[in-house]
């Protein structure tokens, strides 16, 4: 009794699968199409499916004839349904920024950084070329163990892709809003682009490490940060939320999103 119920239930599933796929009418079928191949199915499934196909092709007026069929063979469609392949969902996008840490190695290349900047702003307001500025980030960050691509992503956020338009002006070579504590305080000025990048990297180091910079300190707020945090550090970009920028909601996450975009260049 159990076997009969199982057989009936199994047959119903096969019938439903075939109906959901739809078959071309016999009148429109070539001799090759009449010869269905049921590879991948058990003998029991082949018998049940063959019976359904026979019933289907004997009724040219069946409304299922109007269903659109794909380029895949009938057997492939049936096998896909039996295996559950049709229920697979698209995988979530993989985020490429590696980790949320401030210190570490780059995952984006210098070329990717340059390309992403120029794609978003073909005419950045900087005192050196885009290539030179990116080189400074990789060189200065490399000395201190800061992730250069992430620091550059922060500069893009802080300056609006070097469009500025806020309190800080391009001639300041200030790429991270250092000393800009209000809408009327312009913040620090740096003599060259390299020194401006060095100050940016040193300010990140002040948050992320108790180790002093390898170069002479040019960040005017380095000692202030170290005095506040003493032996404590902030290891991640989201940890800067409400600290580097106020209120700074999602500040670090937005930097990481920019970095993720850079890696796709």
Image: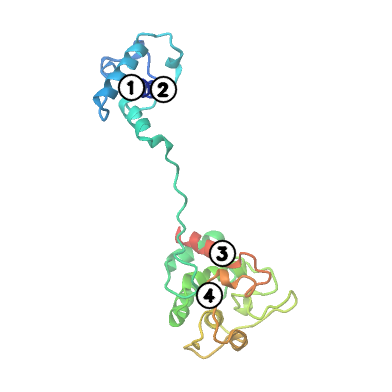
How far apart in space, not on screen, are marks 2 and 4 (Cα)? Answer: 68 Å
Most foreground residue, 84 or 234: 84
Q: Are marks 2 and 4 in contact (CB under 8 Å)?
A: no
How far apart in space, not on screen, are marks 3 and 2 (Cα)? Answer: 48 Å
Secondary structure beneath disc 4? loop
How far apart in space, not on screen, are marks 3 and 4 (Cα)? Answer: 28 Å
Q: Are marks 3 and 4 in contact (CB under 8 Å)?
A: no
Q: Which mark is residue 7?
A: 1
Residue on which disc 3 sits: 253
Q: Which mark is residue 16?
A: 2
Q: Residues within 10 Å of mark 3 (few under 14, many from 20)?
A: some
Report x, y in % for residue 199: 56, 82
Q: Looking at the image, which residue is at 65% across and 72% down?
A: 242
Q: Are marks 1 and 2 in contact (CB under 8 Å)?
A: no
Q: Which quarter of the rendering shows the N terminus?
A: top left
How far apart in space, not on screen, are marks 1 and 3 (Cα)? Answer: 56 Å
Pick whichever of labels 1 and 3 is earlier in the sequence.
1
Secondary structure beneath disc 2? helix
Pick whichever of labels 2 and 4 is earlier in the sequence.
2
Residue on which disc 4 sits: 128
Pick whichever of labels 3 and 2 is earlier in the sequence.
2
How far apart in space, not on screen, are marks 1 and 2 (Cα)? Answer: 14 Å
How far apart in space, not on screen, are marks 1 and 4 (Cα)? Answer: 77 Å
Pick whichever of labels 3 and 4 is earlier in the sequence.
4
Report x, y in % for residue 78: 34, 27
Q: Which quarter of the rendering shows the C terminus?
A: bottom left
């Amino acid at each position: 009794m159990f076997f009969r119920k199982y057989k009936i239930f199994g047959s119903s599933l096969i019938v439903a699968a075939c109906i959901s796929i739809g078959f071309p009418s016999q009148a429109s079928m070539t001799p090759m199409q009449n010869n269905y191949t049921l590879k991948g199915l058990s003998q029991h499934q082949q018998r049940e499916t063959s019976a359904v196909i026979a019933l289907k092709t004997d009724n040219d007026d069946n409304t299922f004839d109007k269903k659109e069929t794909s380029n895949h063979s009938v057997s492939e469609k049936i096998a896909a349904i039996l295996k559950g392949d049709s229920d697979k969902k698209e995988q979530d996008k993989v985020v490429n920024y590696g980790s949320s840490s401030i210190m570490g190695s780059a995952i984006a290349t210098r070329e990717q950084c340059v390309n992403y900047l120029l794609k978003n702003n073909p005419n950045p307001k900087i005192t050196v070329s885009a290539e030179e500025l990116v080189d400074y980030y990789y060189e200065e960050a490399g000395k201190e163990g800061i992730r250069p691509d992430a620091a550059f992503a922060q500069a893009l956020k802080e300056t609006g892709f070097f469009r500025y338009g806020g309190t800080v002006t391009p001639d300041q070579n200030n790429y991270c809003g250092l000393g800009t504590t209000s809408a009327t305080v312009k913040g620090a000025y740096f003599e060259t682009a390299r020194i401006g990048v060095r100050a940016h990297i040193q300010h990140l180091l002040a948050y992320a490490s108790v180790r002093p910079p390898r170069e002479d300190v040019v960040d005017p707020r380095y000692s202030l940060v170290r005095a506040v945090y003493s032996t404590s550090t902030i290891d991640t970009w989201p940890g800067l939320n409400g600290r580097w920028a106020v209120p700074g909601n999602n500040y670090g996450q937005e930097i990481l999103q920019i970095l993720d975009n850079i890696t796709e260049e």
